[in-house]
Amino acid sequence: MRILLSNDDSVFAKGLRVLHEHLSQQHECVVVAPDRNCSGASNALSLLQPLRIQEMDNGFFMVNGTPSDCVHLAVNRFLEEDPQLVVSGINHGANLGDDVVYSGTVAAATEGRYMGLPAIAVSLANKDGKHFETAALVVLQIINHLAEHPLPADQILNINVPDVPYAELKGLQVTRQGRRHRSESMVKSEDAFGREIYWYGAVGQEQDAGEGTDFYAVANNYCSVTPISVDMTAYQSLDNMKDWIEKL
C-alpha cells in the first residue's frame, strides 16, 4: 500500500521516525512533514507565504508549513501518484476529547480525507513517551484491517495508544470523544523589554471521562479508536433549525 506519513511534531520527531521504520517494512511510505513543531496548528493553511519542500538525508521531505499544508502539497502537487492512505503521527502526547479541535495531528488526517483519501491519526498518550513501537504496531494492525474493511468516505480514525509495552496493551476499544473542563487561565508575564505577554495555561481537567470515552480507554491501558466525521453538520438539528429560522 502507498502511504503518506505526516505529523505536527516536525519531520525530526521520534514518533514519526518510529512509525516510518515499522510501516515501511510492509508498505511503500513517503514522509512529508513540517520543518518545525506545529502542535495546536489545527487545520491552518499557509495562504500568505509560499511553501518550499526540501528532501533530507534520510529521504524524508520537509515543508515550511503546517500539517495540513504538508498533506495538501504532497497529494495535490508533489507526489507523482496519489497515496492510498494518509497516516498522521505518532504524536508526542494524547489527542483526546476536545483536543482534536486544535490538534495538528488530527488536522493532517482530515486534510487527507478532504482530498478523498482514507486517513488515520495516531498519538501516544505521553509527551515524553517511551513506547512508540506499541503505537506503530497498532497502526500496522489497523492498516491491514482497512485493506479488507475500508472506512466510510466521511470519516477518519483518531487513535490514542497508552504508553506501555505492546504486551501490556489490553486491546482496542471503539470510543467516543470525552470532554474537558474549561482550560486554566492564561499566564501573564513580561518580555525582556517589560512588555506584557501571555502564555496559554494548562488544559482543563477531564469532565466527561467515563466508560465509553477515549479518556477512559487510555487510562485503563486500552487503545482508543474514535471515528471522527469530517462533515460537521449537526444533522439531528436540521429540522429544529428550520422551525427556528421560520420564526425569525
Image: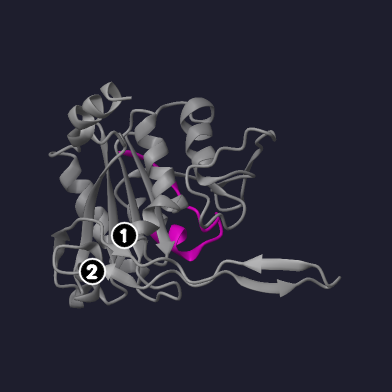
Quadrant housing the N terminus: top left
Q: Which residue was labeled with disc 1?
A: 97
- Among all residues in the image, which is located at the extreme top? 246
33 left or right, relative to 122: right
Q: Earlier in the sequence, mark 2 or mark 1?
A: 1
Horizontally, residue 98 falls left or right of residue 137, namely right
Front residue of this view, candidates 224 and 206: 206
Circle 2 sits in a helix, a strand or a loop, which is it? loop
Q: Is residue 99 in view?
A: yes
Q: In the figure, residue 246 lies in which quadrant?
A: top left
Give yes or no for residue 9 being in the magenta stretch: yes
Give the vertical position of 239 relative to 119 (above or below). above
Identity of the residue furthest to the right in this view: 193
Check disc 1 and report its element: helix, strand or loop. Answer: helix
- In the picture, residue 222 is in which quadrant? bottom left
Determine the residue positioned at 28% across, 77% down. Answer: 164
Q: Nearer the viewer, residue 13 or 238?
A: 238
Q: Amino acid at mark 2?
A: Ala
Q: Disc 1 marks which amino acid?
A: Gly
| 222 with respect to 59 (left or right) | left
**Proximity of marks 2 and 1: CB atoms separated by less than 8 Å:** yes
Task: From the viewer's side, name the closer residue of 42 and 156.
Answer: 42
176 to 114, vertically: above or below: below
What residue span does the magenta drawing correspond to?
Answer: 1-19
Residue 209's disc is 2
Q: Quadrant of the C terminus?
A: top left
Residue 213 relative to residue 37: left or right: left
For image coordinates 66% across by 72% down, the residue present is 188
Please provide percent x and percent y for residue 197. 71, 66
- Is residue 21 in sight in this rendering? no
